[in-house]
Image (cartoon, rainbow, N blue to C red):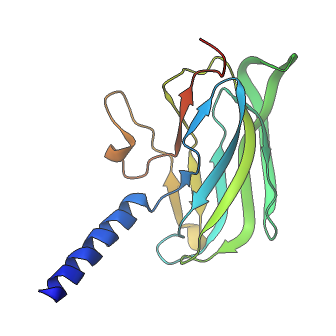
Amino acid sequence: MLKRLIAATALIGASAMVAFAHGTVEVTEAHVGASYKAVIRVPHGCEGKPTIAVRVKVPEGMIAAKPMPKPGWTLEKVKGPYEKSYDYFGTPMKEGVREILWKGGSLADDEYDEFVFRAFLTDGLPVDKILYLPVVQECPDGAAERWIEIPTEGQSSDDLEYPAPGIKLLEKKGGH
C-alpha cells in the first residue's frame, strides 16, 4: 500500500513538473501605462543539453525595453521600428528594442536561471487581455525550446504544447 502511495505521489509530481516546465514570467499581471519588470524564468535546457542562448521577442505596445546584463552572457539588443509612434512621457517613440538576446553563457539542463528586462506598457494595450512574450531557448547542435505559441480565439495557453509566457493587462492605475 505504501509503495503504491509513493508511486502515485511521484507520478502526480512528475505530471505537475511537465505542466510547468517551460519558460514563464514571474509577474503575470501588469497595469497599462506603467513600467513592467519582466523576469523570464528558464527552468531547464533542451532534453539534457544546456541552454546557451535565450531570445525574447518584445511585443508591439511594449516599448523602451532595457535588458539587464548577466555575468557570463553577451547581451544583444535588436532594434527596429514600432508599428506606430508611442508617447513615452512626452517623447514620441517610433522605434526601439524589438528583441533581446542573451548568448554565450551555459545553463545546465538541471539548473534554473532568470533573464530580466524592463519595459513600458503603453496605454493603448487592451485591458483584460494577455500580452505574450515569445521566448526561444537555444542549445548546442541546433536544439531549441521554442515557447512561442499564442492561443487563438477560444483557446487557452493550456491547450498548447509550447505556450509563450503571458502577462494579463490591467487597467491603468487611477484610470477608468
Instruction: Report the residue at 54% width, 21% height from top.
Output: 127
Task: Give whichever of 9, 47 is nearer the camera.
Answer: 9
Residue 39 position within the rendered picture, expressed as x and y whole percent measured from the top left: 65, 51
Where 61 sits versus 57, above or below?
A: above
Where 5 sits versus 66, above or below?
A: below
Task: Give whichever of 81, 159 is nearer the camera.
Answer: 159
Residue 170 position within the rendered picture, expressed as x and y whole percent measured from the top left: 56, 26
Q: Is residue 47 left or right of residue 56?
A: left
Quadrant of the image containing the N terminus: bottom left
Instruction: Report the residue at 23% width, 82% height from top.
Output: 6
Query: Which of the 4 image quadrants contains residue 154?
Result: top left
Query: Which of the 4 image quadrants contains residue 43?
Result: bottom right
Tally of numbered tags: 0
Task: Give whichever of 87, 77 is nearer the camera.
Answer: 87
Where 129 sits versus 114, above or below?
A: above
Quadrant of the image containing the C terminus: top right
Query: Which of the 4 image quadrants contains residue 133?
Result: top right
Instruction: Report the residue at 53% width, 62% height from top.
Output: 144
Task: Give whichever of 54, 68 is nearer the camera.
Answer: 68
- Residue furthest left in the image: 1
Residue 29 position within the rendered picture, expressed as x and y whole percent measured from the top left: 56, 37
Where 116 sits versus 112, above or below?
A: above
- Residue furthest top in the image: 176
Residue 34 position within the rendered picture, expressed as x and y whole percent measured from the top left: 72, 28
